[in-house]
Image: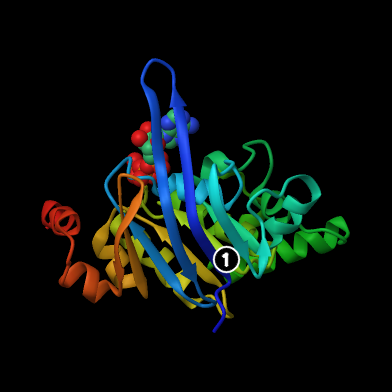
Amino acid sequence: MEPILSVRELTKTFSRPGQGKLTAVNGVSFDLRPGERLGIIGESGSGKTTVANLITRLLDADGGRILLDGEDITSVTGRDLRRVYRKIQMVFQTPAESFDPRRTLGDGVGESLRGLSRREARQEAVRLMERCGLPGEFARRYPHEVSGGQCQRAAIARALAMGPKVLICDEATSALDVTVQKEILDLLRGLEGDLAILFICHDISLVQQFCHRVLVMHRGEIVEQGTPDEVICRPQHAYTRHLIDSVL
Ligand SMILES: Nc1ncnc2c1ncn2[C@@H]1O[C@H](COP(=O)(O)OP(=O)(O)OP(=O)(O)O)[C@@H](O)[C@H]1O
């Protein structure tokens, strides 16, 4: 199957006042296939979030290429970028911050739906929220009136509103307690269709349970990749062994 997302030799260097330059992402290449759940692990500062921000064009790459569904999106901006966001969506660690506190969750979930009347958008938001395991009446609640896990479900519903092909979850379960983490992973696992998920997570056991394949990042580079069994149970690279030993 053709990859839905291909990243080739991606590079990003930051200039830090008084500290010189830092190459946060250095020659990163990987493919993500439809329906695949690909994990990225690595210690804090290894470059995981920078990779996500480059793919979603929140940051400009210094080098390399990003192909989404066959289209080179490495430098897209403006209207083209809005089109890209129909195919690629992100879910973050703290969902409450990404909702407007003065608007209901239903309004937040429905805000990106185009070509629908207000009533239709509200009905669609309710449908999406129910699909993500929330009672429809939650559409009338405000972000501060729901738990962290419920807010994350609403954030996933909002991401799904665009009918994306790729979902990037950056520490999307990290702020949740263990039971709720499992529920959110079950929700993501149960999403029908060919949605591909890039799952950035510092919790190696969650990655092992959830992902089909894992990339290990160290100082901006991918040092190892394979199935969770290969990478987590039989790590080849000394850094991966160190990373896994440090959490077990
Ligand atoms: N805008 C920026 N300006 C300067 N340096 C940055 C910037 N964004 C990230 N960095 C640096 O780039 C490196 C990689 O950061 P990044 O957030 O990608 O790591 P990470 O693996 O996601 O870490 P964490 O797990 O803590 O989120 C870090 O050293 C970070 O300090």
Furthest residue to the bottom? 1
Provide the residue designation for mark 1: 166
Quick check: 185 left or right of 217?
right
Residue drawn where x is 19% and y is 58% of the image: 240
Tell me residue 37's x, y (percent).
Answer: 43, 71
Furthest residue to the top? 18
Sort mark 1 into few (<14), some (14-19) or many (20+) by Cα contacts within 10 Å.
Answer: many
The quarter of the image holding the N terminus is bottom right
In this rendering, the count of numbered labels is 1
* Residue 131 vertical placement versus 220 (above, below): below
The secondary element bearing badge 1 is classed as strand
Residue drawn where x is 36% and y is 72% of the image: 213
Residue type at tag 1: Val
Residue drawn where x is 42% and y is 61% of the image: 199
In the foreground, 58 or 63: 63
In the foreground, 120 or 113: 113
Ligand 1, by image quadrant, is top left
Kindly tell me whether residue 112 is visible in this rendering. Answer: no
The quarter of the image holding the C terminus is bottom left
Q: Quadrant of residue 179?
A: bottom left
Tell me residue 245's x, y (percent).
Answer: 11, 56
* Residue 236 vertical placement versus 23 (above, below): below
* Residue 115 vertical placement versus 108 (above, below): below
Q: Quadrant of residue 87?
A: bottom right
